[in-house]
Amino acid sequence: MNTIVAEPLKSLDEWEDDILLRYPEPKSETAEKQKDDYRNYDDPARDTVREFYRLNHQFQTYDFVMQKRREYLAFNKKEMTIWEAFDFLNQLVDDSDPDTDLSQLQHLLQASEAIRADGHPDWMVLTGLMHDMGKVLCLFGEPQWAVVGDTFPVGCAYSDKIVYPEYFKNNPDYDNGHYNTKLGVYKQNCGLKNVHMSWGHDEYVYQMMKDYLPEPGLYMLRYHSFYAQHREGAYDHLLDDHDREMFKYVDLFNPYDLYSKNPTPPNWTELKPYYEALVAKYLPPTIRF
């Protein structure tokens, strides 16, 4: 799998821009721009997004996910302070993003500041700050389709509610009798704790933070890209009652992720003392990646 090096998106955020077209209505008043203001590409069809999902749907197999879990969940690549990690993440700034030229930290600060402005608890503010930290996978050599994109369960049939479902026909699991039934390797209402999701930054940052944040924040991290479920309800048959309760927090979080972009950068000089204290409250001095 590591031989696939195609980079179809013009920037990592192009995937999120595509979500804004699919799900344009904000769920909170945090949005400072309307849906039509977010896209400035000449071609709304965006062949690059289609190519991204062609690769994503072809190669996100059950075996691929297991391989990446073994490779990355040992967390033996780097050890950094959170602020060193943000400096590392900021290498992903891409001038081709039409919606913002802010660094990754500034984008995350916009989301976390919107959460704070609405009076949510500080653990949720920290969740906003950390939710895209898993994108450092790109800096470890992972292709975009293994870092961003809508997430979905592997090991069972791919729902037709997932974006561009036709591309799953090229996936080896599509015709595999172990994986292509509604339940596949799972049991009815087994709970998402027993379900393996497609590999990417959501699962990676969840695993990174699972010892440090309360459970609602961990659900926000782990499932904020699981649009087939929290927007379409496509995998109700795998959820248990606890998942349904926790998904209220996923729904609460997502507008802050999608609709908080703004061309005005946060004032880091003013914000730094608050966020340094917040990070010190919840996280250890260094984090392993």
Image: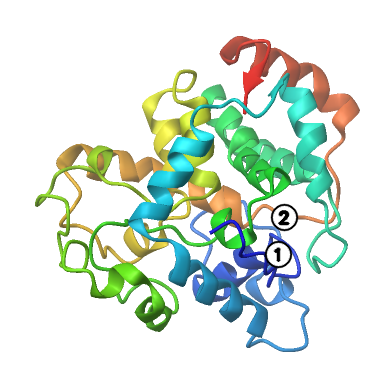
Mark earlier in primary sequence (2, 1): 1
Examine the rendered structure and indicate whether residue 245 appears above or below residue 120: below
- Which residue is the site of mark 1? 33
161, 119: nearer the viewer: 161
Picture coordinates of residue 54, whole percent (x, y)? 51, 77
Q: Residues within 10 Å of mark 2 (few under 14, many from 20)?
A: many
Would residue 216 be visible to someone looking at this image?
yes
Residue 159 appears in the rendering: no
For the residue marked with disc 2, what is the amino acid? Lys
Asked whether the beta carbons under mark 2 and mark 1 sit within 8 Å of each other, the answer is yes
Instruction: Specify the quadrant that holds the C terminus.
Output: top right
The dot on residue 276 is none
Write the residue at 86% across / 46% down: 265
- Residue drawn at (63%, 52%), measured in percent from left and top? 142
Label 1: few (<14), some or many (≥20) within 10 Å?
Answer: few
Q: Residue at x 16, y 41 (%)?
A: 241
Q: Nearer the viewer, residue 194 or 78?
A: 78
* Quarter-of-image position of residue 106: top right
Q: Of 114 and 68, which appears nearest the observer? A: 68
Residue 230 x, y percent position in the rendering: 35, 57
Secondary element under disc 1, as helix, strand or loop, is loop
Q: Is residue 40 left or right of residue 187?
A: right
**Residue 187 in the image: above or below residue 116:** below
Choose top left, top right, bottom left or bottom right for residue 46. bottom right
Front-most of residues 50 and 221: 50
Applied colour scheme: rainbow
Amino acid type shown at disc 1: Lys
Q: Which residue is mark 2?
A: 261
Residue 168: quadrant of the picture:
bottom left
Q: Is residue 22 above or below residue 90?
A: below
